[in-house]
Image (cartoon, rainbow, N blue to C red):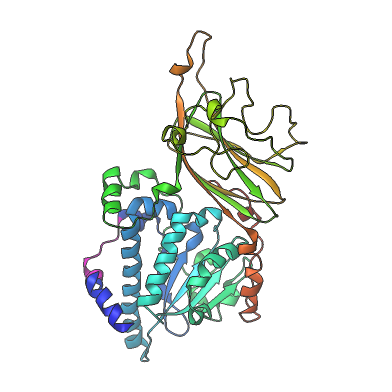
Amino acid sequence: MLCHSLVWRKKYQVDRLLSSYELPAVVKDYFPGGWHHHDKDGRPMYVLRLGQVDMKGFIKSIGEQGLVKLTLHLCEEGLRRTEEATAKFGKPISSWTCLLDLEGLNMRHLWRPGMRALLHIIEMVEANYPETMGRCLVVRAPRVFPILWALVGTFINDNTRTKFTFFGGGDCHAPLSEFVDPAFVPDFLGGPSRTSIPDGGIIPKNFYMSEEDYEREKAEGFHLFDDNMYHSVSITRGQVHEVVVEIEDHGSVICWDFDIMKEDVAFTVFHTTRELPPCTEVGDRGGGGDAEEDGEPVGCAHSPLPLAMLSLESSSAPSTIPKHWVAGEDYKIVEPTITCHDGESVQGSHVTSAAGTYILQWRHVDNLPHHSFEFPLALHKGKVMYYYELLKSQDYRGSMSSLQSSHSGNTTHSSSDQSALSSCPSR
């Protein structure tokens, strides 16, 4: 392991990172993490407000290599600070403490490329910086946290897992004082110590990489954005595009991420316990889906594949929901309609409350006046690039209780953040 790590450090010139690496502007302005004093054992303390990190924005701004360099710089800075702490306190200090604030963590943080980045970073740190994290203090964990922990916990070795301590509830100032001098508790946690850490938040698109930079990084190796993950569809006036998801039990999570590439598009999520009509000749009723144009298979009401485009102006039903079905009786809206504009990026999720069929629907919004003599060929097209994923409840159910049982009695978990279980679009 040591030989492998030495080769790895030489290959990536890690030893020169502290002197050669300069933080990108987007990191300086939007990355909500930084070094902040030390804990009671003299370990340097790194504060990260993970719930305020726009993972999608960072991946699109600095790419995989940028995230890797940022992580390596953090780890190298941590080693340098442990040497300084050893000299300052007159005792050997070889590890640092991480104070992890999870307020704001929600389903958009489960976006697959972001999860890939997180898992890749965890594996890299575990392999090349073993035992450098002395303790991880986790505060204000919302109800969505068990899902995240179930996904990443298996990549953290057992010894590292024992270093996690969890604090529940909004007031964590007093409990933190067991590990951190009360004078050093950050102000955003109710302490007196001011930090210079950015607030985080959604990264403006003007920081995003250009197409040329994106293609260049992609050509250099594995890229966190897998183009095959995303479907691209065009929607003209009066058309919808739908994805049908079958749920067998409650508590599963449907996550989505989409970008509006052109025009305005409305997005809604429906639920029904009734059986949908059998699939008819969908391909003959289509209208402009890119998947059809590329010769890809087109789904139907009982297929996990995206459904074809269906025209409202045709004699057939405009969607998989029959026209004669009554809203509130035969089906219901579980995520209210939001209108998304050209250039917007939306991430969200829905925790299912019942088994049945859930329908994700994108509908073209036509705000321009039209006249009877206009031809359909002249109509504007909306364009959407989307991705969705289903997290089954059995994959994470019970993970919180098992997590609680593995720590001391003074550690609890917050359950006050109800909003984490609802749709949480970010633009």
Closest to the observer, 251 or 290 = 290
Please indicate whether residue 301 sits to the left or right of residue 10 in the image: right
Which residue is depicted at the point 62% across and 20% down? 315
- Image quarter (top left, top right, bottom left or bottom right) of the N terminus: bottom left
Give the vertical position of 47 relative to 5 (above or below): above
Which residue is depicted at the point 48% across and 17% down? 376
Residue 191 image offset from top left, x and y in percent: 53, 69
Instruction: Report if residue 63 is visible in the image.
Output: yes
Closest to the observer, 107 or 36 = 107
Give the vertical position of 335 relative to 401 (above or below): above
Residue 270 image offset from top left, x and y in percent: 66, 40
Closest to the observer, 266 or 385 = 385
Residue 390 image offset from top left, x and y in percent: 58, 53
Instruction: Report if residue 15 is visible in the image.
Output: no
Q: Quadrant of residue 224?
A: bottom left
Q: Which residues are magenta?
A: 15-24
